[in-house]
Amino acid sequence: MSPSEVRSKLRQAQSKYNQAVNRYNSAVRAHNQQVRTAVSKYNQAVNSYNSAARAHNARVRANRERLRHELAKLESAASRPAYVTLRTSVNSVQHSYSRLEARAETGIYSERYNDILDLSEREAANSAGVMNALLDNPEDAGTDEDLTVSELDPILSELSGDALDRWHGALFSLNPRNPDAARHFCTSARELLATILDTFAPNRRVLEAMPDCDTIPSGAPSRRAKIRYFLHQRELADEALENFVEEDLENVVQLFRTFNDGTHGSSGRFTHAQLVAIKKRVEGAVTFLWHIIPQPLRQAA
């Protein structure tokens, strides 16, 4: 082999070596990039989880602090014989929540229950809060906007435009100077709760899914049966949770009766602050019920 041929062979070998090195370096760079991307996604997921955990823990702390505050106020007014039926209902809500919380403390519920448990704690505080508002006659420090702006707008828009219009009509009538406020508001709020139950838990579907469910004298499924239907559909079936939801809705019904009897105080009227508390109580109950309904049932309706 001549010297020129040797040099040619060396150049070819060097070229192949350089190509192999380049391919290796390229593969290493691609691998490193994949690792960096995976690490970045992992860190983002961890940060998102931590952020959600912090937000959840903050809500829990706020809910529990408010619940303790409202129960302490209610306990201090235990000797005042007013709104006896409603107070009994509030006590039932608190006992039901205590049983639910005790089960949650054992770790029996998975993460799927977190939102419902958060809302349950808020509802327990809401039921005690409106009772305190009725007993304490809080000063009117709010504005008309407190009675007209509603957190239910996104929910009712998804339900139906008619439901949204009727609810705003009820809020418009909710005025301390309106003698018909109680009747109008209670009627609309009752219809709203009934509409939600009947729309997403039609009698026929509930009976097909649970033939042995509780029924009312007409043979239609009871409110408790429809609550159980929602929880089963969401795979959140639990007797303690079912009992709490039932007690919570019954408490709102008892609030309607108290509000509608027109016997508050010497004038038979409620203050602006008390009307705001009643409105918020109903909004909280509707929001709670809405979150129990599975998304597929909302879409199917």
Image: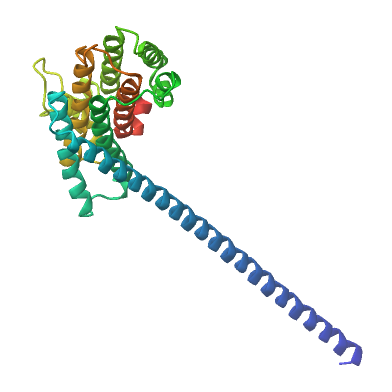
Marks counted in the figure total: 0
Scheme by which the image is coloured:
rainbow
The quadrant of the rendering that contains the C terminus is top left
Q: Is residue 6 left or right of residue 103?
A: right
Query: Which of the two residues, 268 or 124, is positioned nearer the viewer here?
Result: 268
Q: Position of residue 37 (x, y in %)?
A: 58, 60
Q: Is residue 291 left or right of residue 72?
A: right
* Quarter-of-image position of residue 64: top left
Residue 228 in sight in this render? yes
* Residue at the image point whose x is 36% and y is 33% from the top: 295
Q: Position of residue 173 (x, y in %)?
A: 36, 10
Considering every residue shown, the one lying at the far left of the view is: 217
Query: Which of the two residues, 246 or 201, is positioned nearer the viewer here?
Result: 246
Residue 208 in sight in this render? no
Query: Which of the two residues, 149 or 233, is positioned nearer the viewer here?
Result: 149
Q: Is residue 200 left or right of residue 203?
A: right
Q: Position of residue 265 (x, y in %)?
A: 21, 16
Residue 12 sits above or below residue 260 on the image = below
Residue 177 sits above or below residue 59 on the image = above
* Residue at the image point whose x is 29% and y is 34% from the top: 292
Q: Is residue 82 left or right of residue 298?
A: left
The quadrant of the rendering that contains the N terminus is bottom right
Residue 6 sits above or below residue 289 on the image = below
Q: Position of residue 144 (x, y in %)?
A: 43, 18
* Quarter-of-image position of residue 36: bottom right
* Residue at the image point whose x is 40% and y is 15% from the top: 168
Residue 267 sits above or below residue 70 on the image = above
* Residue at the image point whose x is 29% and y is 28% from the top: 285
